[in-house]
Image (spheres, rainbow, N blue to C red):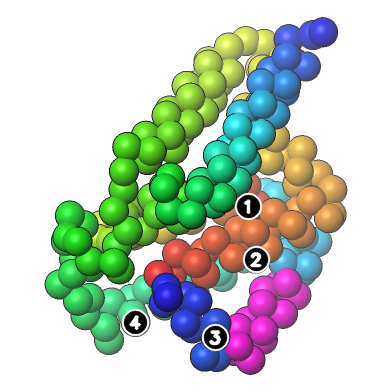
């Protein structure tokens, strides 16, 4: 395997890890923090909400415009 | 019930119209190519809409004190537990891997997250999905 393929494989494993965490947290019925819980904690303050919005804006601009 | 869920339940026709509009807009945006004026405009419009909505919401609504303090026992802000560390750890691992690939050379052998996004954006359906997802995420954040 080339280095590129290894790098892609690790990205895939990380993505799979996030997906598994999402499923496990959802199925735990509140025992584990879901991503939504974490987002709620962050957006509980205007500062946190503003920072997440900025991250969203940057992501969109970076991915679709520039 | 979260505010978003209540909003969807009470005003499902607004939600359906917004969702349809979002999909249509994502379809239009998927026709653009990065580094063009069209792509700039297509991306900038949701950004302006989000900023405007946030500004209006901040102006017309005052958050209850329970939401202002993240350490309160209110059910509006779910308490985090030690398993929140799972997400923090995941974010740190991804950030470290992104940094490693970004700093490594040759760059073509070490694709970063941006490279993956470019790969996704290279197909029409990929860009449509990514743009629709991005719009949905923006709505979710604005309506919280």
In this rendering, the label closer to the viewer, 1 or 3:
3
Residue named by callout 2: B42
User: Is B21 part of what is drawn in magenta?
Assistant: yes
At mark 1, the secondary structure is helix
At mark 3, the secondary structure is helix
Task: Evaluate whether residue A2 shows in this view.
Answer: yes
Residue named by callout 4: B56
In this rendering, the label closer to the viewer, 1 or 4:
4
Q: CA distance from mark 1 to mark 3?
A: 34 Å
B116 sits to left or right of B31 = left
At mark 4, the secondary structure is helix
Q: CA distance from mark 2 to mark 1?
A: 8 Å
Q: CA distance from mark 2 to mark 3?
A: 30 Å
**Taking A9 as reference, is A49 above or below it?**
below
Name the chain letter of the residue that bears numbered label 4. Answer: B
Name the chain letter of the residue that bears numbered label 1. Answer: A
What segment is highlighted magenta in the picture?
B12-25
Labelled disc at residue A65: 1
Which quadrant of the figure has residue A47?
Answer: bottom left
Residue named by callout 3: B9
Image point 67% across, 11% down: which residue?
A: B106
Question: Which of pointers 4 and 3 lies earlier in the amino acid sequence?
Answer: 3
Task: Evaluate whether residue A46 shows in this view.
Answer: no
Name the chain letter of the residue that bears numbered label 2. Answer: B
User: Is B132 part of what is drawn in magenta?
Assistant: no
Image point 54% across, 85% down: which residue?
A: B9
Point out residue B31 in the picture as x, y percentages from the top left corner: 80, 61
């Amino acid at each position: 395997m080339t280095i590129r393929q290894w790098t892609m494989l690790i990205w895939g494993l990380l993505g799979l890890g996030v997906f598994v965490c999402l499923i496990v947290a959802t199925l735990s019925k509140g025992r584990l923090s879901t991503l939504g819980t974490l987002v709620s904690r962050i957006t509980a303050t205007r500062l946190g909400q503003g920072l997440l919005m900025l991250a969203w804006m940057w992501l969109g601009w970076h991915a679709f415009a520039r | 019930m979260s505010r978003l869920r209540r909003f969807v339940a009470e005003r499902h026709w607004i939600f359906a119209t917004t969702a349809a509009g979002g999909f249509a807009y994502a379809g239009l945006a998927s026709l653009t190519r990065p580094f063009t004026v069209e792509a700039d405009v297509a991306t900038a419009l949701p950004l302006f809409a989000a900023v405007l909505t946030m500004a209006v919401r901040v102006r017309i609504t005052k958050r209850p004190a329970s939401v202002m303090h993240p350490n309160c026992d209110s059910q509006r802000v779910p308490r985090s537990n030690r398993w929140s560390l799972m997400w923090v750890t995941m974010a740190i691992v991804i950030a470290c891997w992104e940094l490693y690939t970004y700093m490594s050379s040759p760059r073509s052998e070490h694709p970063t997250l941006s490279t993956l996004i470019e790969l996704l954006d290279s197909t029409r359906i990929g860009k449509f999905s990514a743009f629709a997802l991005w719009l949905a995420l923006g709505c979710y954040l604005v309506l919280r």
